[in-house]
Image: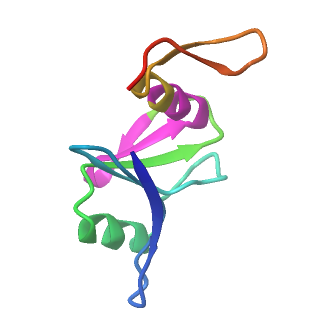
Amino acid sequence: MQLHFLRTAAGAEIDLVLEFASERWAIEIKHSSAPVPSRGFFEGSRDIEATRRVLPYPGSDAWRLRNDVEVLPIPQLMRELLHRHGCRSVGSDGMPVRTSLR
């Protein structure tokens, strides 16, 4: 997995781009309980041909917005990322426990 951000002179901006072997996620981190993606996020995700668009936020519900944008609670997104990398549980110290190597 590679990660970086995107900001162009034309105003496209993505807070976090995650690149996997066959996927590219555009992530715009929100602090609001009613997150709305920016125009620059849509432009940037189109420019990089994102396969997934995600807005993590501090709430507890998940839903979809227009243009296949997923609004996800931050812990849910973190669990997905940990699961994707072989971490299936959390130890007594609160740290992820890796169950396989990738």
Quadrant of residue 14 in the image? bottom left
Please name the residue shown 78% across and 16% down the image: 93
Q: Is residue 91 above or below residue 36?
A: above
Quadrant of residue 58 in the image? top right
Residue 70 forms part of the magenta stretch? yes
Residue at the farthest front position:
101
Is any atom of residue 24 visible in this view? yes
Please name the residue shown 31% across and 44% down the image: 20
- What is the x, y in percent for residue 2? 41, 52
Please name the residue shown 69% across and 11% down the image: 91
| Region in magenta | 63-80
Is any atom of residue 37 visible in this view? no
Instruction: Tally the numbered discs.
Output: 0
Residue at the farthest bottom position:
9
Residue 71 forms part of the magenta stretch? yes
- What is the x, y in percent for residue 74? 59, 37
- What is the x, y in percent for residue 30? 60, 54
Colouring convention used in this rendered image of the protein: rainbow
Q: Is residue 15 above or below residue 54?
A: below
Q: Is residue 64 above or below residue 19?
A: above
| Foreground residue among 86 and 9 | 86
- Taking the image as shown, residue 61 lies to the left or right of residue 33, namely left
- What is the x, y in percent for residue 96? 62, 20
Q: Quadrant of the C terminus?
A: top left
- Taking the image as shown, residue 37 lies to the left or right of residue 47, namely right
Please name the residue shown 59% across and 44% down the image: 57
Q: Quadrant of the N terminus?
A: top left
